């Protein structure tokens, strides 16, 4: 059967001497693998379509399993993301995270739109730390692990923001009276809690320019990292690379 789908390349790997297999996050068909014959050859007309982060329209034959590319057209190459080591690192993390969370052929319209918005925001020089934290929140929400941030997850009571801790293990905020249910629960500043609530409400497609203090970004990063580890438990190569970049001051 012949398919014509809009998609973003989230993974690209060599296959044989001259071919590549790409994994697409598509708007209407979920996650799909496509074989691109001859993509590694110098004069291949399809080589550009196999570059990671590329957003395009892909036409391919597929019965079951792997498809075979027939033709395609680039909508947005995102070449600037590949040329900047910092942007490339964050974009790679966004793609690998989605690749690991999204099951094959799972309905992908929401995932596709969030990834597209994430790559666009990175391309527009918006703060990558803010973008990725917001993207992680969207991933948690769509995977069914949205954190409770407006009331204590244990007793259900609303407290002043100053009285909350955050429990990635239990999945949300804990008041002081209930902290004994999760002794390792993390401290959280009112500023960071308000930002997390904003992340829970805002769609990446509507993200404007957000100015966040460095200390708040660091706090949010640690909290979102803990949520991702506790709720999804993924070991991602791209995240390890981001950690190395932080270590050496990129």
Image (tube, rainbow, N blue to C red):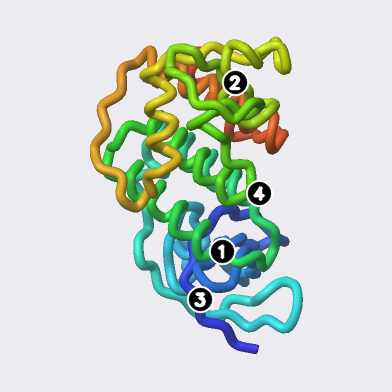
Q: Which of 104 and 156 is in front in this view?
A: 156
SS category of the residue bearing label 4: helix
- The residues tagged by marks 2 and 1 sit, at their Cα atoms, a distance apart of 33 Å
Tell me, yes or no, if residue 42 can be seen here. Answer: no
Return the residue found at the far right.
Answer: 64
Read off the residue under disc 1. 108
Q: Is residue 180 left or right of residue 137?
A: right
Mark seen at residue 174? 2
Q: Residue at x 58, y 11 (%)?
A: 176
Read off the residue under disc 4. 101
- The residues tagged by marks 1 and 3 sit, at their Cα atoms, a distance apart of 12 Å
**Which numbered mark, 2 or 1, is in the foreground of this view?**
2
- The residues tagged by marks 1 and 4 sit, at their Cα atoms, a distance apart of 11 Å
The answer to whether the residue labelled 4 contacts the one labelled 3, judged by CB atoms less than 8 Å apart, is no
Q: In this view, does 236 lie to the left or right of 191?
A: right
Read off the residue under disc 3. 5
**Which numbered mark, 3 or 2, is in the foreground of this view?**
2
Q: Residue at x 62, y 71 (%)?
A: 37
- The residues tagged by marks 4 and 3 sit, at their Cα atoms, a distance apart of 21 Å
Q: Nearer the viewer, residue 182 or 114?
A: 182
SS category of the residue bearing label 2: strand
């Amino acid at each position: 059967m012949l398919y014509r789908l809009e998609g973003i390349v989230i993974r690209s790997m060599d296959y044989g001497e001259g071919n590549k297999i790409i994994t697409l996050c598509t708007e209407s068909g979920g996650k799909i693998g496509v074989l691109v014959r001859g993509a590694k050859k110098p004069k291949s007309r399809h080589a550009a379509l196999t570059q990671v982060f590329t957003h395009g329209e892909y036409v391919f034959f597929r019965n079951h399993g792997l498809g075979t590319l027939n033709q395609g057209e680039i909508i947005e190459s995102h070449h600037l993301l590949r040329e900047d080591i910092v942007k490339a690192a964050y974009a790679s993390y966004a793609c690998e995270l989605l690749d690991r969370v999204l099951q094959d052929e799972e309905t992908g319209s929401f995932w596709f739109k969030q990834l597209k918005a994430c790559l666009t925001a990175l391309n527009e020089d918006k703060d990558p730390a803010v973008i990725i934290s917001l993207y992680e929140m969207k991933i948690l929400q769509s995977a069914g692990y949205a954190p409770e941030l407006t009331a204590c997850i244990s007793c259900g009571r609303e407290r002043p923001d100053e009285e909350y801790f955050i429990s990635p293990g239990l999945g949300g905020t804990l008041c002081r009276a209930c902290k004994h249910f999760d002794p390792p629960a993390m401290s959280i500043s009112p500023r960071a809690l308000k930002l997390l609530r904003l992340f829970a409400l805002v769609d990446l497609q509507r993200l404007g320019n957000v100015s966040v203090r460095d200390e708040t970004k660091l706090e949010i990063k640690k909290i979102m990292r803990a949520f991702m580890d506790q709720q999804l438990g993924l070991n991602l190569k791209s995240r390890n690379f981001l950690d190395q970049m932080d270590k050496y001051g990129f």
